[in-house]
Image (tube, grey):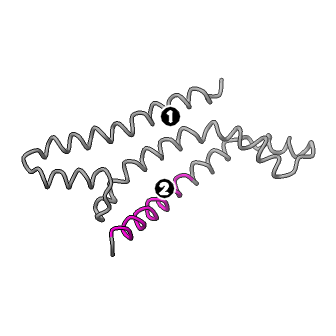
Amino acid sequence: MTFQQFEVAAIIALSAYTAAFIAEAVRSGVNSVPLGQAEAARSIGMNFGQVLNLIILPQALRTVVPPLINILIALVKNSSVAGAFFVLELFGYGRQMANANGDQVMAVLLGVAFFYLLLTIPLGILASTVERKVAIAR
């Protein structure tokens, strides 16, 4: 296999793996909306599409967004698995640099860790900000 085929395979594998978590987060968000909301909307004559778009999804969005951002953070970290299959991503580049500079392995690995933090910390901050904005007043 060529490197491009490895990259495509890694993208497909990570997409399929992450899609299951995204589907579960969306499903649980939709299930978090009380059944009475949909029944009330149907009782005033809304069709299924209107109920979904105007009633269910806006309420489900409040509970779905924080887990989706956490899934995105997990996807960034899971991308390092692609390095095991010779796909050059952040960890793969770090491994190449460590092999080329044998006396600077710790510095290279600390640099890789820094860049992972550079990607994931802003996503965590975004998650907490969005969670505060969409929080339901109880």
Mark 1 closeness class: few <14, some 14–19, many ≥20 residues within 10 Å? some
Q: Amino acid at mark 1?
A: Ala
Q: Residue at x 52, y 53 (%)?
A: 21
- Please state if 34 lies on the left or on the right of 72 as rendered: right
In magenta, the rendered stretch is 3-22
On whether residue 4 falls in the magenta region, the answer is yes
The image quadrant where one finds the C terminus is top right
Whole-angstrom CA distance, mark 2 to mark 1, is: 18 Å
- Residue nearest the viewer, comparing 93 with 10: 93
Q: Could you say which disc has been placed on residue 3 in the image? A: none
| Residue under numbered circle 2 | 18
Q: Position of residue 66 (x, y in %)?
A: 54, 38
SS at circle 1 = helix
Mark 2 closeness class: few <14, some 14–19, many ≥20 residues within 10 Å? some
Q: How many marks?
A: 2
Q: Residue at x 48, y 59 (%)?
A: 15
Q: Amino acid at mark 2?
A: Thr
On whether residue 134 falls in the magenta region, the answer is no
| Residue under numbered circle 1 | 127
